[in-house]
Image (tube, rainbow, N blue to C red):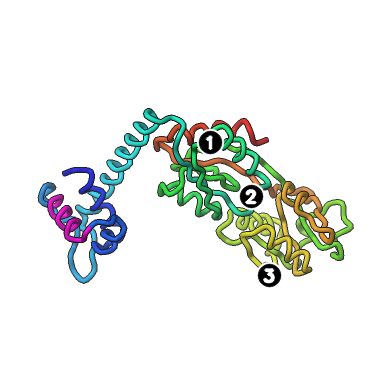
Amino acid sequence: MDIRHLEYFSEVARHLSFTKAAATLHVSQPSISKAIKQLEEELGVSLFYRSKELELTDAGKAVLINTKSVLQAFNNLTSELTDIMDLKKGEIRIGIPPIIGAAFFSKLISQFKETYAHVDLSLNEVGSKSIKQGVEEGSLDIGLVCNLPDNKGNFEMVRLINDPLMLIVHTDHPLAMENEVELTALKGQPFILYRHDFTLHDRILEECSRNGFTPNVVCQSSQKDFMIEMVEAKLGVALLPSKIANSHLHPEIRAIPLANSNLSLELGLLWKTNKYLPFAVREFIEMSKGFLP
């Protein structure tokens, strides 16, 4: 048995297909089939039911759980050795919610690149829920997420920003002249809301429910600029973090504070527990702690 056999087995188990695993790994299907057969002979068990559709046996499921641990340990080892040999190079794969964008992040990125010019930053713009999944599965090293979970689970995290949400309305809207607005005043108003895969989507729905109403959602989006444009077109009202609301306003739009509201964009950095963090990732985390207000 060698690490390659376990990699082949893990990929076949993920796809439940020798053909798809071969295509992903860029290895011939006979080579993968031979490696799986050798693994089964060495372990003395069948790992797959080979009927019309490939399926893991109970023994295969048990082997897969341990295989993931072995491969993770091997990846940690190789990453650490790379760090030792070349401390200031590498890549950081970062998940960023579209609602955050440059308003919170561009200065940190710029300063990090000035300090570590040879570290590549791969930025992936997806919702917070997808970011957590990516960090969990290993496709992302770290993620900026909105509204950090109370239950840490498999993650380590640091809270960075708490930015209250503000109401944005067209200047012709009846609420436009108010100095502050209670959330209950928005009952029946058409809402331009974050898409369902954003944690702020759930937080706003929960807060509206606590105030005795369900928002009238007429549009959902992942892009703050589109949300602002919809408000400008008088299609509804929206709730945006104050940093974004105050810096992206058009002449026809007004930002109004919410009175007696707990709604805010809580921005934090999240990474996986018990996973080796390369030097570059550790430096990024430390810089973010001291950089963001």
Residue type highlighted by circle 1: Ala
Task: Judge left or right: residue 8 versus residue 86.
Answer: left
Query: Which numbered disc covers residue 100?
Result: 2
Task: Judge left or right: residue 150 versus residue 259.
Answer: left
Mark 3 or 1, nearer chain start: 1
User: Residue 141 placed where, x, y %?
Assistant: 46, 43
Considering depth in this image, is 202 or 22 the residue closer to the camera?
Answer: 22
Residue type highlighted by circle 2: Ile
Considering depth in this image, is 60 or 22 the residue closer to the camera?
Answer: 22
Magenta-colored stretch includes residue 106: no
Magenta highlight range: 28-40
Residue type highlighted by circle 3: Val
Residue drawn at x 67%, y 57% is 224
Of tags 3 and 2, which is closer to the observer?
A: 2
Classify mark 3: helix, strand or loop. Answer: strand
Mark 3 or 2, nearer chain start: 2
Q: Is residue 115 visible?
A: yes
User: Residue 226 placed where, x, y %?
Assistant: 68, 63
Magenta-colored stretch includes residue 29: yes
Residue drawn at x 72%, y 56% is 239
Q: Is residue 152 visible?
A: no
Split into 4 quadrants, where in the image is the C terminus? top right
As drawn, 78 above or below 94: above
Of tags 2 and 1, which is closer to the observer?
A: 1
Split into 4 quadrants, where in the image is the N terminus? top left
Residue drawn at x 57%, y 47% is 145
Q: Quadrant of residue 209?
A: bottom right
- The residue that label 3 is drawn on is 218
**Distance between the Cα atoms at labels 2 and 1?**
24 Å
User: Residue 184 placed where, x, y %?
Assistant: 77, 59
Q: Quadrant of residue 225?
A: bottom right
- The residue that label 1 is drawn on is 117
